[in-house]
Amino acid sequence: MYAEQLLPHDIEAEEALVGALLIDGDSFLRVSHLLKPDDFYRERNRICFASCVDLFQRSEAIDQVTLARELARTNQIDTVGGMAYLSHLVSITPTSAHAEHYANLIARTATMRRLIDAAGRISALGYADTDDVEATLRQAEDTLFRVRGSQTERGFVPLRQVFDDYLSERADPLSADLTGAPILTGFNDLDELLGGMQRSDMIILGARPGLGKSTLALNACINAAENGYKSGIFSFEMSAEQLAQRILAAHAGVDGHRLRLGLYSEPEEQRIIESIGTLSELPVYIDDTPFQGMMEMRSKARRLSLEHGLDLLVVDYLQLVQGSNRGRVTENRVMEISEISRNIKGMARDLNVPIITCSQLSRVVENRPGHRPQLSDLRDSGSIEQDADIVLFIYREDAYYTEEEWDQHFPGRPYPRNIAEIILSKHRHGPTGSIRLRFRDNLVRFESLVARQGEF
């Protein structure tokens, strides 16, 4: 009992937070990215918060009545103290306005408890007296890293802030109401084929690694933002800084590799500064938290929509989204991806925005003659095809044929250098088909062919 009392905790903050949720269920949006049920010290408060999470995931209201019903459904109402305890929580909470403050207090004490637990684990490693000191040190570092990782929930940051940080390291230079309108990708042929990206649509953009799916999604996102649409990006593979550099290279027309190394000419530097000024004003928000699941994503996206507005969302990419079995061994990855896919579609409908979701393709496409992708190549789940309103594939023949091999297989036909075919394989609202774009790999961007027809 004495050892338990020494563990940091704040019961009053826990009770006040749950009380705030019962007073105003929408407060959950403000705190869900800050807390997990395991952050609660007292069991009854942990159970109450976990039940609020379940209600939110089912898009049900959170209040005293619904929470009591949920607790009764899971046979936990007596464990928490019945309706009397829920009434007590409401009575001791003066307002829901301070929910975030309560959440931060709970998160802080939870981190301190994890740190104490990590110290015990590291101490046990030291007492083990193993011969492999390097392995022991790695285990100790991993133990401490997991404590830090549990509190690195970043959330969305404006693209402007990323560029401010970018400039501070190098130098010190410097809306319209579109609700309901389709979102244009900025590529005329693709917009004509799609009729624009429709609200509530789940758009799958599939390709094998290195063919440009992240680039095309980013290009469409920035093009939309330049037309006044508010855009959010969930990036699981690249940091916000890496994304910003890609966006900057494409906009300024500067080789991405030389931009990263700072090896650009004076005219290019001027273009970079001008592009940073232009891009910093765009309504683009980036969340580069590496490990998160649908509940966190949905909560953050809804909060972004409420605070800044949201017209388009990019998820890069689907196979890196954490499933509901996060932290446990996953027996069936196909079922987990299916659940994630359904939740992304549900999020698109809930937010009433198109969601461009990048997806890996299976290796089967590499062994197929011609290597053209098809719907069955969507990796890990057939339900991705079912859930998606639009499925786009990127196909580049120059990725599979050298110029010499091309001349042998297709004599007389010009080599399709840097030409990407965008294949519309599923279109819930219209016809399928394909268009061609030029892929400028060094500039990290796609371009319409019509504008550069003279180069062919």
Image (spheres, rainbow, N blue to C red):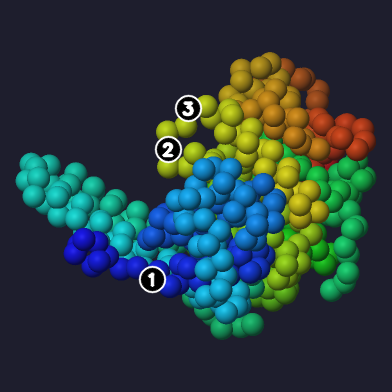
Q: Could one spot residue 190 in this view of the protein? A: yes
Residue 447 x/y as whole percent: 78, 50
Residue topped by disc 1: 10
Image height check: is 298 above or below 364?
A: below
Callout 3 amino acid: Glu
Residue 120 x/y as whole percent: 19, 55
Q: Is residue 142 left or right of residue 425?
A: left
Q: How many residues crowd mark 3 within 10 Å: few (<14), some (14–19), many (20+)?
A: few
Q: Which residue corresponds to the image point at 89% horizontal and 58% vertical from the top-left?
A: 180
The total of numbered circles placed on residues is 3
Image height check: is 55 above or below 411?
A: below
Q: Which residue corresponds to the image point at 19% horizontal and 44% vertical from the top-left?
A: 135
Q: Could one spot residue 167 in this view of the protein? A: no
Residue topped by disc 3: 331
Residue topped by disc 2: 328
Callout 1 amino acid: Asp
Q: Which residue corresponds to the image point at 81% horizontal and 38% vertical from the top-left?
A: 389
In the structure shown, which secondary structural element does the residue marked by tag 1 occupy? loop
Foreground disc of the pair 1, 3 = 1
Whole-number angstrom distance, CA of label 1 to CA of label 2: 28 Å
